[in-house]
Amino acid sequence: MVYVCNENNFKKTEKMKQFSFIILSALLLSLGATANDSEDAKTVYKVETDKSKVLWVGKKVTGQHNGTLNLEKSEVWVEGNDVVHANIEMDMTSIVVEDLTNPQWNKKLVDHLKSDDFFSSEKFPKANFVTTGFKPNAEGNDSDTEFIVTGDLTIKGITNEISFPVSVEISDNQLTAKGKTTLDRTRWDVKYGSGSFFKGLGDNMIYDDFEIEFDLVATTEMVN
């Protein structure tokens, strides 16, 4: 049998080639997009506020007080095996004092800490820490889990940059993070009883530095 390649057959063949090329191109583009989506996929870990905690310690000449703060909606972002971002929100109306067992004295201190002398909790009910960078902690024992985190801490509407060491561990769909730092409260206009601003305080002086320690537990969801 002799096949005659007339004009119609030629046109049909060319159209089939063009169609096949379009299908192949679309398939390759689809595969490429899928690969990029997979590479760019990030994991958001939602902080479980009922399992996480923020601890604080404030010191004065005659002793110290300690307590807790509650966390609000907070997230940690991970890309691959790297922590790339975190947004931690604290409820400044939830200040708890743990060392005073007398209810009257406990309430008096809590109310004072929430007042304008200290954190103005009614005017500024939230404090926020937003990270701007993570890098391995050169002084740590494990470069995969120990980092120096840098970020902006906002208290009373005043934002200052801070850096401190953290340890982060990721297992399946859970992330845990622990860290501790010392802050100068006067950077956020908390000056009550500060020997840096007031003279003759004697035993009533409260040290500028206070300690913050956090223990976060978060679970995950995938995002693109």
Image (tube, rainbow, N blue to C red):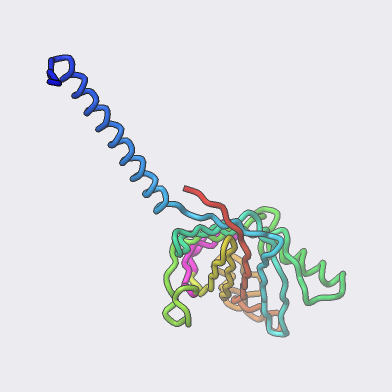
Q: Position of residue 92 (x, y in %)?
A: 68, 60
Point 47% across, 72% down: residue = 148
Q: Determine the main secondary structure of the stretch shown in magenta.
A: strand
| The N terminus lies in quadrant | top left
Q: Is residue 191 above or below residue 28?
A: below
Q: Is residue 35 above or below residue 146?
A: above
In screen coordinates, is 55 left or right of 157? right
Span highlighted in magenta in the image: 146-162
Q: Residue at x 43, y 73 (%)?
A: 136
Residue 205 screen position, x and y as percent = 67, 79
Q: Quadrant of residue 70?
A: bottom right
Of residue 48 and residue 148, the one placed in the foreground of this image is: 48
Task: Depth check: give the residue in front, 108 or 142.
Answer: 142
Residue 199 % position (x, y):
62, 79
Q: 47 or 112: which is nearer to us?
A: 47
Can residue 178 be seen here? The reply is yes
What residue appears at the point 15 percent right and 20 percent down from the top-left corner? 10
Q: Is residue 16 magenta?
A: no
At a point 68% along the width and 84% down the height, the residue shown is: 61
